[in-house]
Amino acid sequence: MKTIIIALVVGAFGLIYPPNHSDVIRVSPEFFAEPTIPAYKLKTVREVLSQLKNAKGDFRSRRPTLRFVKDSGGGPAIAYPKQGLIVFEEKAYNICAGFGKDSLNALANILAHELVHCYEKHDWEDYFAHESKGFGMDVGVKDEALEDEVQADYLGGFLCYQAGFTTFGIAPKFLEKVYETYNLTDEKLSRYPKLQERQAMADQSEQKLKDLLDLFEMGNFLAALELYDDALEYYLKVLEDFQSREVYNNVGVLSTLSAMKLFAPTENKFAFPIELDVRSRLNGTRGDNNKELREAKLMEALDYFEKARQYDAFYPIAHLNEGCALALLGLSQKENAELEWEDAAVAANRAIRLAKDSPKWANTHADALLLLGILRALALDSVGAEAHFAEALQLNANHFLTNVNLNALRGKPNTSQTPQGIDLSEEIIDDLPFSSIKLNKTDIRGQIVDEEEHKITLVAKSYASSMVFANASTTGSGGNKTKKDTFLQMTGPSYAKATHKGIKLGDSLSKVLGKYGEPQARVNLGSGTMLRYKNATDFSGLIFQFDGAGKLMRWVIHK
């Protein structure tokens, strides 16, 4: 029995949605459809749409509503940003289905494009709707609409990436099918781009997307290498174009980790669950004991966690991380410690309330209990601390950080927990020893930071089946300059060769652990996991990156 929707939402232009008739079913709170559309199509669209919306994590206003129809009379998909509405045609679904193994990627591509129109509040429907309905626009409006299309192309691509979809190369082929299916001839599109021009726009957007992904991924790798200050700059660069709760949260995390470096070992013996890497700081915090700087970084982190919560007030990770930053601020500001720790406890309890009923947030639930235990320990309540730690272990018996903090509470060392470095001297990608790789000025991709006493440059070069990135970081001026160059060589998506120990793309995380043992670091990403292995003799090492299904998607040698 179908559910008939009777509640009406009136848009800014008087558009009534859902339409006032009985042949509309409610698939989910923000997804409506005509009842003649097959259930399997509804299920597929709902799942892809949900993944994209969750990846964006923007709940500041009513989330875009989708209506799945047989025929809109306007085009494959039309966004009405002011109403928060997307109309999607079954014919467009069928075009996506024709892409075979890339059908979900094609579907994600078009839905993400329309979601961006809504999130960015673009004022114009897409060009298909304009042309089909015969709307007249002057040249200025046309140019603005086309700029919106380019932005929706590349930000939509980044949204797909965050949600775990791969859309490179799909847009030009999809456009060709759309023009053919909807009979969009040159005569009909006399005032709009012809197919070749629109495909060129898509190619341009894809290059911008690649640049944006390079920034985001370099930030991830630098975070995995504990180069938090430089990683922070890469994330900030991403935020100039793409804002989401996850990116804001990551920036706040890196600001907090940077501040944690500035505590002396005697000031903080606990391992806070803010850490991206649960194994990288077991020998105690390092520190310059720079009180003013670390407090500035913690205040900066709190600002970013608040921004993440503004995007999604029900995002438990942001509440947990806010609690960690407040607890550290109390450690630094002894005169305000009690007040900061009270606020930290409130944030931790909010995280627990939001996480406790969802398996997705089980680790966040345990981390929030761990934070409550640390706060009790800081208040010299060892009994209360032990009780919270026990609760965390009940949720996850292998919760590594809980055991670390129990040892700290009981005065036991944790140094033995850190795996020893391994010999990576025989690891090689593309038959290219690092000593043979030469980067030139022509390989510079751009300045991430360009200030008088701080410069960060991204350098990149392509090889047969791999890519080399370099982060060139310089601080200071004149004779007081400090340079730090970090080189990464990563396998391409079709790399066929194996590591020195026989690991290939597609292998499982457990197989890598079986061959290489326990890593020095595990880094949780929004769409997978990284394992970091350190060379026994220097900073260099090996990073394995896995997708959300635990399959190896690439590995990286770093120097």
Image (cartoon, rainbow, N blue to C red):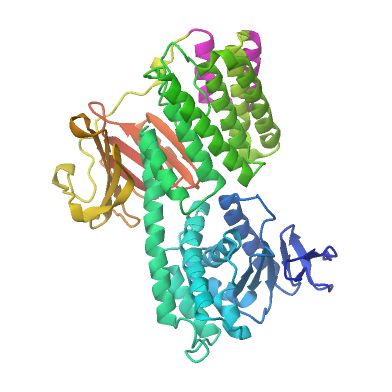
The quadrant of the image that shows the N terminus is bottom right
Residue 362 shows in the view: yes
| Overall secondary structure of the magenta section | helix
> In the rendering, at what x and y percent does residue 200 appear?
39, 74
Q: Nearer the viewer, residue 13 or 132?
A: 13
Residue 394 shows in the view: no
> In the rendering, at what x and y percent does residue 317 appear?
59, 36
The magenta region covers 383-411
Q: Nearer the viewer, residue 131 or 462?
A: 131
502 vs 4: above or below: above
The quadrant of the image that shows the C terminus is top left
Q: Nearer the viewer, residue 476 or 458?
A: 476
132 vs 454: above or below: below
Q: Is residue 225 left or right of residue 430?
A: right
Instruction: Judge whether residue 402 is colored magenta.
Output: yes
320 vs 151: above or below: above
239 vs 424: above or below: below
Q: Residue furthest bottom?
A: 187
